[in-house]
Image: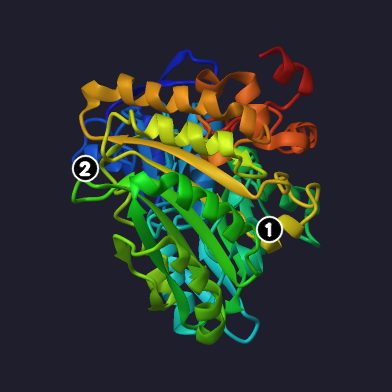
């Protein structure tokens, strides 16, 4: 590889000489990919095709030593760094222009301890990898709703999923993590080791280091009753009003979602998704309440393995399409919010766009707001507004539709937003970043100052290391 011009954390350019690159490669076990190398286009491709960033160098690591070496190399030259785990996010924070990407996508191993009901997984694993291994032992933990999502990004941002009613968020089940810090040191964060870092990791995103492996509490999870009932869009008002009562009274065993979208056959529809983690008899009794809505267009509710449940929605937001997302946390679904959603969806410019309520779950709501960095425990739902399209030239009208709807819904939210749906400071401004972290923001700033005072890890929903600097931006 020849000398490279790269961007630093200050935005200036620096030339990394060929001799220094070759010296780095001599000890690096993984794969170094530069902009002129074969495989570069594939290596810089992530789930959201709307993101078109061109890193100068991608370091595809195969172990913790590679990650440490990459951090030290970047720090030597003060390079702009992005960290890629699953690469499945709206904002594209796992890439950076002209900087260095530390890529964990080759680190996907999962080790299950069935006796202790725990699992350690590497930071590049996706939930599809994780669930496949844990279900061999009849175990699972809360893990999002799309098998393509990375475990690291989802967990560090909170982690809303089908098992949240009984077991809480993904971050509530994170019992430890091995983290490569900005100084290149490796430490473990848990309830007994660096507990303040462990607190920060559970909702503070990638601001504090690179989680090379994560340990989870698992639970026995066998056959579930899960699927979707969809109804014509003309019944949206009725279905959404029913859904708010149905979800509000859900027992711990039940988690739900409700979406408005266009089906593959072109019919606009509103659907209720359910996952019941209990006996089939109890599920039939509780889910029979949905019958009041009449004959559905589609009914896929049936017994399923958890691994199968985790693939239920994969086709709704496939990789390779263009995405723009925003969200509101909501404590309730009021009539005005319902009317706003329906009115705006009538004007949706893309048949691929989707609006979806995710229920956080009873167990998630019972955790104290200060117990983890994820503090939005008063929210009952995360309302995802997902613009999705295929032609890059159409981006403006689709992103504008999402923004307009988001602004119209602001009066009905809690004021908080899900960090997974937040872009960079340039996209969201100070208010957007603060809204993502809520009441725990000031404590996160203090811990950023402690663990990453130079803001080495900044390609994320960034927490600046001093409150004065954060307030001034």
Q: Residues within 10 Å of mark 1 (few under 14, many from 20)?
A: many
Q: Is residue 80 above or below residue 443?
A: above
Picture residue at 58% right of the left edge, 52% below the top: 244
Q: Residues within 10 Å of mark 2 (few under 14, many from 20)?
A: few
Mark 2 and 1 residues: CB-CB less than 8 Å, in contact? no
- Residue at mark 1: 364
At numbered mark 2, what does the secondary structure look like: helix, strand or loop? loop
Q: Is residue 110 above or below residue 247?
A: below
Give the camera-side residue of 348 and 365: 348
- Residue at mark 2: 39
At numbered mark 1, what does the secondary structure look like: helix, strand or loop? helix
Rendered image quadrant of residue 311: bottom left
Picture residue at 29% right of the left edge, 40% below the top: 45
Q: Which mark is residue 388?
A: none
Give the camera-side residue of 297 and 2: 297
398 relative position to 215: left or right: left
311 relative position to 137: left or right: left
Residue 434 in sight in this render: yes
Give the camera-side residue of 78 and 304: 304
Mark 2 vs mark 1: which is more N-terminal? 2
Report x, y in % for residue 146: 41, 57
Report x, y in % for residue 256: 52, 60
């Amino acid at each position: 590889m020849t000398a490279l011009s790269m961007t630093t954390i200050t935005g200036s350019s620096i030339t990394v000489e060929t001799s220094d690159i070759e010296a780095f490669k001599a000890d690096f076990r993984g794969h170094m990919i530069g902009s002129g190398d074969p495989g570069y286009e594939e290596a810089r491709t992530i789930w959201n095709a709307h993101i078109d960033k061109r890193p100068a160098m991608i370091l595809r690591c195969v172990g913790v030593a590679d990650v440490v070496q990459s951090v030290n190399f970047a720090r030597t030259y003060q390079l702009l760094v992005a960290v890629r785990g699953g690469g499945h996010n709206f904002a594209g924070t796992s890439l950076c222009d002209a900087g260095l990407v530390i890529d964990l996508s080759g680190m996907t191993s999962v080790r299950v301890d069935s006796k202790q009901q725990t699992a350690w997984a590497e930071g590049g694993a996706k939930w599809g990898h994780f669930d496949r291994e844990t279900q061999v032992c009849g175990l699972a933990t809360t893990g999002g709703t799309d098998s393509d999502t990375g475990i690291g990004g989802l967990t560090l941002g909170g982690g809303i999923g089908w098992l949240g009613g009984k077991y809480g968020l993904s971050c509530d089940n994170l019992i430890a993590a091995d983290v490569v810090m900005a100084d290149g040191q490796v430490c473990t964060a848990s309830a007994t080791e660096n507990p303040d870092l462990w607190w920060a990791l559970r909702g503070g995103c990638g601001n504090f280091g690179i989680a090379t492996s994560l340990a989870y509490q698992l639970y026995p999870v066998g056959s579930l009753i899960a699927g979707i009932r969809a109804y014509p869009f003309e019944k949206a008002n009725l279905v959404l009003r029913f859904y708010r009562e149905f979800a509000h009274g859900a027992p711990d065993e039940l988690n739900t979602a409700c979406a408005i979208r266009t089906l593959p056959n072109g019919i606009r529809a509103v659907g209720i998704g359910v996952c019941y983690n209990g006996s089939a008899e109890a599920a039939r009794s509780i889910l029979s309440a949905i019958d009041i809505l009449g004959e559905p267009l589609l009914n896929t509710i049936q017994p399923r393995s958890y691994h199968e449940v985790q693939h239920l929605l994969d086709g709704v937001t496939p990789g390779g399409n263009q995405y723009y997302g925003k969200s509101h946390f909501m404590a309730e679904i009021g009539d005005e919010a319902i009317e706003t959603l329906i009115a705006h969806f009538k004007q949706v410019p893309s048949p691929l766009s989707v609006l979806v309520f995710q229920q956080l779950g009873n167990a998630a709501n019972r955790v104290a707001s200060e117990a983890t960095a994820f503090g939005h425990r008063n929210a009952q739902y995360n309302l995802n507004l997902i613009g999705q399209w295929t032609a890059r030239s159409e981006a403006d009208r689709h992103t504008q539709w999402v923004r307009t709807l988001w602004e119209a819904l602001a009066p009905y939210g809690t004021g908080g937003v899900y960090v997974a749906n937040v872009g960079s400071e340039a996209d969201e401004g100070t208010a957007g970043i603060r809204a993502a972290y809520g009441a725990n923001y000031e404590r996160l700033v203090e811990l950023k100052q402690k663990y990453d005072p130079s803001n080495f890890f900044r390609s994320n929903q960034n927490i600046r290391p001093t409150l004065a600097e954060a307030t001034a931006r």
